[in-house]
Amino acid sequence: MSQIDQSKIRNFCIVAHIDHGKSTLADRIIEKTGLLTSREMQDQILDNMDLERERGITIKAQTVRTVYKAQDGNEYIFNLIDTPGHVDFNYEVSRALAACDGAILVVDAAQGIEAQTLANVYLALDHDLDVFPVINKIDLPSARPDWVKNEIEDVIGIEAQDAPLISAKNGVGIEDVLEAIVQKIPAPGGSADNPLQALIFDSVYDSYKGVIVFCRIMEGKVSKGTKIKMMATGATADVVEVGYFGAGQFIPCDELSAGMVGYLTASIKNVKDTAVGDTVTDAENPCAEPLPGYKKVQSMVYCGLYPADGAKYPDLRDALEKLQLNDASLFYEPETSIALGFGFRCGFLGLLHLEIIQERLEREYNLDLVTTAPGVIYKVYKTNGEVIELTNPSNLPDPSEIEYMEEPIVTAEIMVTTEFIGSIMELCQERRGRYLGMEYVEETRALLKYELPLNEIIYDFFDALKSRSRGYASFDYDIKGYEQSELVKLDILINREEVDALSFIVHKESAYERGRKMCEKLKDEIPRHLFEIPIQAAVGGKVIARETVKAMRKDVLAKCYGGDISRKKKLLEKQKEGKKRMRQVGNVEIPQKAFMSVLKLDDGK
Amino acid sequence: MDSLGVYVHVPFCVQKCAYCDFLSAPATREKQQAYMKALKKEITCESSSYADYEIKTIFFGGGTPSILKAEDIGEILDCIRKHYRIDKDAEITLEMNPGTATREKLTALKKAGINRLSIGLQSADNTELQMLGRIHTYEDFLKTYHDARETGFHNINVDLMSALPGQSMEIWIQTLEKVLALEPEHLSAYSLIIEEGTRLFERINEFPPIPDEDEDRRMYQETKRILAEHGYQRYEISNYARAGRECRHNMIYWQRGMGHTADYVGFGLGAASTVKNMRWKNTDDMKKYLLAFDGEKAQEIKEDIEKLSENDCMEEFMFLGLRMMGGVSKSEFQKSFGQNMDDVYGAVIQKWIRQGMLVQQGDRIRLTDAGIDVSNVVLADFLLD
């Protein structure tokens, strides 16, 4: 491998708005460079989790190395690093970008620039990547490539007149893209003679090899036997294997040197030791300083996860343990709820991350889960000077002990066609948004900028945005920081008993509205009992909203003749079975889905 | 000698009623004759299993058994008499619809051995009868009833339904009073249940509105009060009788466990049996049923055969026994299962006593009036895990 000419390496990624064809283009590049025949291609090679294919998004960064014989007669090594496509994974994206030297910007020929296009391209430019655009989906009848070219130049300010016009789906124009990669993306810098300095941009856990660390070698070289050190976590290990990325497989090689992208294994047992963004160096000949940009991953959204069947608690614990092997950003710790029993308080990068983990637990580990309302981390400043980072509303101290509270705020950019500006602004106002400004991207589209409390956007903001813009609005955000806020804990009382799993923190001004909606929703979810059940929302012991589930007056099998007892028994069994899926709180049986349905409260005007 | 109840199913009717989810359909005389033939063969073939039994009750149910000729009923009874031992005081009931029996037919039925009639009136209001898809008027019923009395039937049940679409309390009380004036020995009064697969279920929008739950329960409570005034005791959720006139056949279904065990066997299409803790159901496929008794040897028609476990038996002792207003007896439970009822069900019983749905009186546990209204919820709790 040492004879690889550093000037013939191209390390790049593809950035795009969701659905603009990033993964399809990646597949075409792999196919055209002969790594796989099209017969061997499974659709979208790089999205290899079922969930990724279904949702059409990339959750985990994937990397593949291919060889391209360019028109100049030389062979080039392409390392394509596919980045996650969602704001929840922005930090992972930024590290993957840092591993590249250039980026392909894919823009949909019909839709043009979207909020994520901008966010991602700015992220790439921030990392000093050379970005060149390609215009995809030119086969669509509504395609307007010239208009999109102008838009790219006007809005982003990068040259777009000679952008390849392609249809990744139909394999049109892919050659142009490959040539552009050779010509427009610079070869990597660095020298193999310097001390080792490699950027970790991802890692996966393999039960045989331990953690497989994905890295970009910035300086120096690494091979089997090198004693490495992770500069941020301090972990050390002896390298067992180095290699590069085939399509869906790891191909060992002798050495990785400056400019190359590959993996290393060193019998590391925990992905926590190989944090994304950390710098790998040679323990015996360390580099002077780590690469910039390392951040400790922080969970932004928390919720309680409980097994629907209490006896499955150990199974849930094992499953979380296994998922965490591969996902250092997943946090969990045991907690107990009066209503739900034993479970875990889990931390996630965002709501999508939460949903993904939840779905994987349900599908891959066959667990039935009850999820409590997701919340953010609040900072509680107590009168005694103590500061608590609150992740579970039940742990909120008594109001008398609280000096003040802070909540996380994001800066959000919303791209929307002009006809929906009004309704989106209204939505942002309802969600306590602070208007920062608006730019017209073109005549019919504007970019709205708001500051929004994170807890207002984690529930259903994205759904609400879509429904109020008929699907046209797109959205991206960045965490800005913490701000003091008038927050209260909203408690739900069912039959006069507080249900801890339904409590949540809400802004004082929204408490009444949210409480009312919660009560209405719960009224529909809780089946009638033999007695009347009041459902109340309360703040600080004061009831602010109430609904009532009327008592059931009649449930009787009038006719029981003919000796066909089995049929009658089945009816009773069905009744009993329904009860099993309920949680008992005091005298009231609450269906498990009631705990989750209250998460979606927007009435979607 | 063990006791046996015999059920004979007659799956024919003149026309399907709007609320009916029983196994029944109109049929030609040829079909009826083919069915009769198979039925007699089934009764004959099965007899060897019941050599040690004495039949205490026979019940012809349907459908509309009275659609058959009196001779048909006679032949079936003769067939049973020939192959089984029958108690001389056996209760032998025939379900009938008004307008399906003349005075002559009633005389013949009486002669054939029928000693109890269960007449499906449902309502004394002709508009309601028409809405339900009944083929008779109240006047037809009156004629049949008087004919039955005059031909010597001294044990008659009348079926009634409350909470019909559009029904008011006033109309319901009128129905009750009209029927009470006739002084039948027994009354079945159920509040209507709309079963899936019935015309009423499919086309509920074409019917007048159904009384709401509160009205339904008021009607039910009024029924109990009015009938009690006239000397009828409610002895099961929907059944009322003058003293000593309870339907013995139905009691066999509801009273499980030792002490008063009677097994029951069902003959005919779809009929259910429970014998020595074995339970099964005959096929409800008419073709299959007829073919089974066509050749020399009878084919198997028993389906869903299951052996009842100790737990099954305890569950049924409770959830069927509690349908009876007398409830269940702790000492009988102990005798039947060798276990203390409280050891098995103590927590459940106490829970429902606290909520006022069950009450304990000496050795017996029974449903309260409030408990009857929501009995499914209470009874479901007696299923064991």
Image (cartoon, rainbow, N blue to C red):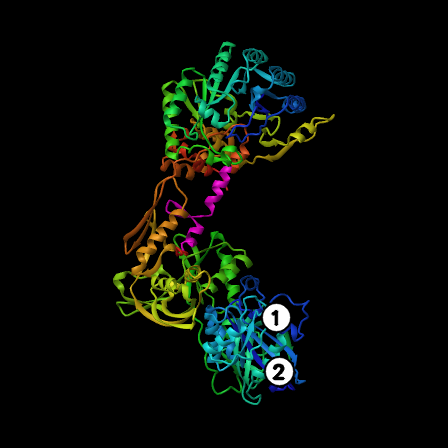
Would you place residue B106 above or below residue B360 in this image?
A: above
* Chain to which the residue tagged by mark 1 belongs: A
Does residue B137 sit above or below A219 in this rendering? above
Question: What residue type is disc 1 on?
Answer: Asp
Local SS, label 2: strand
As drawn, is A564 to the left or to the right of A123? Answer: right
Question: Measuring 56% from the left and 11% from the top, which residue is drawn there?
Answer: B104
Image quadrant assignment for residue A456: bottom left
Q: Quadrant of the N terminus of chain B?
A: top right
The answer to whether residue A241 of the structure is visible from this angle is no
- Please state the extent of the stretch shown in magenta in the rendering: A571-598
Q: Position of residue A225 (x, y in %)?
A: 60, 81
Q: CA distance from mark 1 to mark 2?
A: 27 Å
Q: Secondary structure at mark 1?
A: helix
Mark positioned earlier in the residue sequence (1 or 2):
1
Tell me which residue sits at (60%, 30%) in the image.
B270
The verdict on residue A578 being magenta is yes
Residue named by callout 2: A255
Mark sitting on residue A27: 1
Mark 2 closeness class: few <14, some 14–19, many ≥20 residues within 10 Å: some
Q: Amino acid at mark 2?
A: Glu
